Image (cartoon, rainbow, N blue to C red):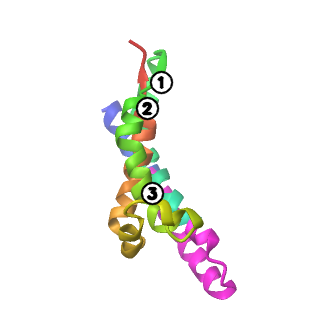
Amino acid sequence: MKRFLYYLGSTVVIGIIFYLGMKYHINLKKEAEMSFNMFPTLIFTIVSPVVIGMLLRIPKLILEIIEKKKWTFDWAKIVAVGLPALYVGMAPYLYYTPMGDYMPFAAVFASLGASTITTAAGVVFGYVLLDSLKEND
């Protein structure tokens, strides 16, 4: 029962943070329409899926931290899964910068815009970032 309440509470907190984030995103879009400054909206669009991914991993990470284990960083996981996910998540936005000409497949992701693929990639990166923390064997 204690574990159930822990996960239920975590779900409620994550849901509230998600709801507040979406309200903030709507306000950023309205402000961008009035000021023609899209930069804050762009940054929020890139960062928010990463934060959501991290929020999804935090409940288990807290349980692991309570066990007081020594921790290390799993470089293989972050390089093999995290960096490609980060690339897919940021490519549509980086395509319009000077380095966009040198990024393979950036035009493909830019044509998708802020789609489900880029959002999912951001969530995966955030989750893998915290999941790469592992106990030292």
Q: Is residue 116 above or below residue 36?
A: above
Q: Residues within 10 Å of mark 2 (few under 14, many from 20)?
A: some
Name the one closer to the observer, 126 or 106: 106
Mark before the other along the chain sequence, 1 or 3: 3
Q: Which residue is mark 1?
A: 65
Q: Could you tell me if the residues under marks 2 and 1 are in contact, i.e. CB atoms within 8 Å? A: yes
The three-letter amino acid code for the residue at tag 3 is: Pro
Question: Quick one: quadrant of the N terminus?
Answer: top left
Check disc 1 and report its element: helix, strand or loop: helix
Residue placed furthest toward the right: 35
Q: Secondary structure at mark 2?
A: helix
Asked if 119 appears above or below 115 in the picture, the reply is: above
Placement of 91 over or under 66, stated as above or below: below
How far apart are the two marked residues, 1 and 3, measured between alpha carbons? 24 Å
Give the CA distance from mark 2 to mark 1.
6 Å
C-alpha distance separating marks 2 and 3:
18 Å
What amino acid does circle 1 point to? Ile
On the image, numbered disc 2 is attached to which residue? 61
Are there few (<14), some (14-19), or many (20+) residues within 10 Å of tag 1? Answer: few
Residue 63: x and y, percent? 42, 27
Using residue 61 as the reference point, say whether residue 41 is left or right of it: right
Return the x and y of residue 105 as percentages of the image width and height.
Answer: 37, 63
Image quarter in which the C terminus is found? top left
Q: Quick one: label 2 or label 3, which is nearer the N terminus?
A: 3
Q: Which residue is mark 3?
A: 49
Instruction: Give the magenta range.
Output: 14-42
Residue 9 part of the magenta-drawn span: no
Between 117 and 68, which is closer to the camera in this rendering? Answer: 117
For the point 45% across and 62% down, the residue is: 91
Q: Image quadrant of residue 81? A: top left
